[in-house]
Amino acid sequence: MPGGRLSHQERRAIAAGLTDGLGYAEIARQLDRPTSTISREVARNGGGRGYRADHAHYATSSRARRGRPAMPKPQSDADEYAEKFAAIMVDGGLPRMAARVLARLYTADSRSLTAAQLVHALQVSPASISKAIGYLEQVGMLHREPDPRRRLQHYVMAEDVWQKAWQVSSQTNQSWADTAAEGAALFGDSAAGRRLAQMADFFHVLAEDMSGGAGFEVVDDALTVLAMYREAGRVVDADRVAAVLEWPLERVVAALEVASATRLTPEQRAALAGDLG
């Protein structure tokens, strides 16, 4: 019994048999084909009354061409690195597609990418890109910049993207702490309650260490002052820093104290110490 696809001639024989009122079994016997092959062919191409041999043949050929899988896009070294970069972010808790989008933005030559560029680079659907963009916007890790001339949306990574990632991680730890505390209250003085209470304490302290305590704000201030020094190319007097940032002098001094405790060279420490004095 022959197998494989039906030929154009066999489809014409099916059409002729249907016109003569033959059943599927009889047409199958004449063509030495399984009855199921004939019934599927007719059902797929208009049914017993609408079957046309030429239309069925070309429609089947067209479906076969569309069904061929696209050749995978060859990966460059940059592509491989971006995927490795994304995998690290996934291990850190970022959703996979959001991590892939962020990795592409971070490793792109331009400061922004469009949705179409991301679809092409990642070989995924526009819906997948849209969902990932929505998540990254929600957590403040990127924003949109419209291009009125081309009616496109460009996606730009936030300048403080890693601080945003840190804050998201901190918020996740706080959610763990809150959920564990709720469970500890529910189970009370039991083995489960004690385990959950211990978990709540751990994640609460971790969240506090990352962002909840006053120390985090001072560290953030210190990074701001150090970034200002980097832009200026020199150490700036504390009074001048306070004036430019419109901060109280005490806030600048506290930030400099934290900055001076970081891994600076002796010369940098001496320069900061001079400001502190």
Image (tube, grey):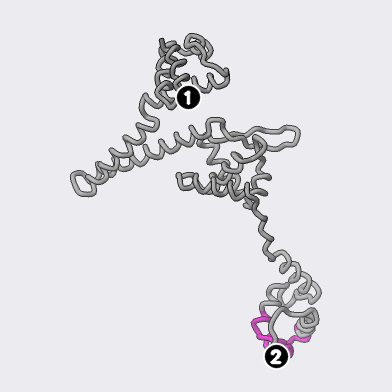
Q: Quadrant of the C terminus?
A: top left
Q: Main secondary structure of the magenta part?
A: helix
Q: Quadrant of the N terminus?
A: bottom right
- Counting residues from the start of the chain, the first of labels 1 and 2 encountered is 2
- Residue 62 lies, in percent from the top left, at 75, 67
Relative horizontal placement of residue 147, taking residue 214 as reference (left or right): right
Is disc 1 in contact with disc 2, using a CB cutoff of under 8 Å? no
| Circle 2 residue | 29
- Residue 227 lies, in percent from the top left, at 53, 23
| Circle 1 residue | 223
The front one of 193 and 268 is 268
Residue occupying the far front of the picture = 266
Give the residue at x 71% y 89%: 32
Label 2: state its secondary structure: helix
Q: Amino acid at mark 2?
A: Arg
The front one of 124 and 17 is 124
What's the magenta region?
18-39
Give the residue at x 62% y 52%: 124
- Residue 241 lies, in percent from the top left, at 50, 13
The front one of 6 and 174 is 174
Q: Amino acid at mark 1?
A: Leu
- Residue 26 lies, in percent from the top left, at 70, 89
Which is more foreground, mark 1 or mark 2?
1
The answer to if 29 sits in the magenta stretch is yes
- Which quadrant of the figure has residue 73? bottom right
